[in-house]
Amino acid sequence: MKLGLGLYRHMLDRQHFDFARQCGCTHIVVHLVDYFNKGNQRNKNNQPIGDDRGWGYAGDGGKWWTADELRGLKRAINEAGLELEAIENFDPAHWHDILLDGPQKARQMEGLKQTIRNVGAAGIPVMGYNFSLAGVSSRMVGNFARGNAQSVGMDGVDERPIPNGMVWNMIYDEAAPPGFLPDITHDELWSRLEYFLRELVPVAEEAGVKLAAHPDDPPMPRIRQTPRLVYQPKLYRRLLDLYPSPSNALEFCLGSIAEMTEGDVYEATRDYARDIAYVHFRNVKGKVPHYKEVFLDEGDIDMMRILRILKNSGFEGVLIPDHTPQMSCGQPWYAGMAYALGYMNACIKMLD
Ligand SMILES: [Mn+2]
């Protein structure tokens, strides 16, 4: 198994690539969506929590990720001695009407297809996505981890409806008319996912790219009055069965799976190991709607047992820390990541 680090858009520079190398990483996962766009500057290195405006503003719907741009990013990462394993998340500006079944759906699907071709042309093996209307929401910040380390958790569901112009917890249209997203069923959302996979997986196959689905975070059946898709381990099977292909794969988030109320994270790891593109290696205490993110060695999950299952199942892909608690020092995000990566590196070496 390989060690990787996920970097936010504003971290995509040589200093951060060197930091990853110094922590023992061989691979990088990049976020190209700027969750801190247009003035949302609070806690810039923390994972975003959001307020009434969610995580802030989506990017420019008219500006797509070009093959040249992606090749340049890969080159910069390679020059630091690392591989670019995956891009994590589409920009809501690029696919809001695919999520919402809106009027620009067909045009945006053509854009996503070209994006996947560009990702493949740049030699990037994985495109991670999270098919969700509310996105990551209902979370709160607190001193939940060992030694009062700041992390995130959940204590109840955000029941406010989602305003027009917003999806995936970001604003894509500031000028949207007043009102809220219509109420839809789970089946309606599954049929939107099915359209997405039927259109995009064949293009991904041809481009040599794996689409990798993140489960719902947090894994609740409904949040903000909208249905969600993969909020129990067995629902990952339903997603895979919609379009069986090596390019229909999983961004396997251990924290989210452990937070689910049914199933078992070890069984799920065994069941899905062959379909995993890469792993979010994160530990938690509790289950939805009451859980806390904690350090890798203090949560409910026996991380070493997960690694043994992955190894015995033949998984040879990349693990990244996902989120970590912030450590009390001048550089809380960096210390948290360095701690997590050191722990993961030691575990992987012990396993070998
Ligand atoms: Mn995750």
Image: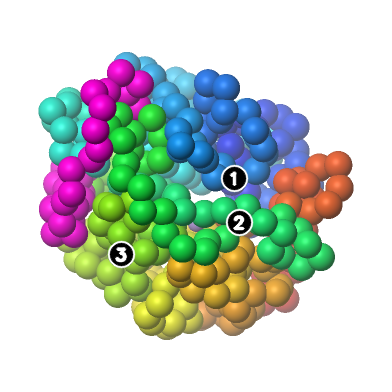
Badge 1 marks a residue whose secondary structure is: loop
Image quadrant holding the C terminus, namely bottom right
Residue 210 pos. (x, y %): 35, 50
Left-right relation of 46 to 37:
right
Q: Which mark is residue 47?
A: 1
Look at the image and give the residue range highlighted in magenta: 172-200
Question: Which mark is nearer the camera, 3 or 1?
Answer: 3
> Label 2 is placed on what type of residue?
Val
> Picture coordinates of residue 279 (x, y %)?
50, 61
Please give the residue where the numbered disc 3 appears in the rendered image.
221
The N terminus: image quadrant? bottom right
Q: Position of residue 122 (x, y in %)?
A: 43, 31
Q: Is residue 341 above or below residue 208?
A: below
Verify whether residue 146 appears in magenta: no
Q: Residues within 10 Å of mark 1 (few under 14, many from 20)?
A: many
Q: Label 3 amino acid?
A: Pro
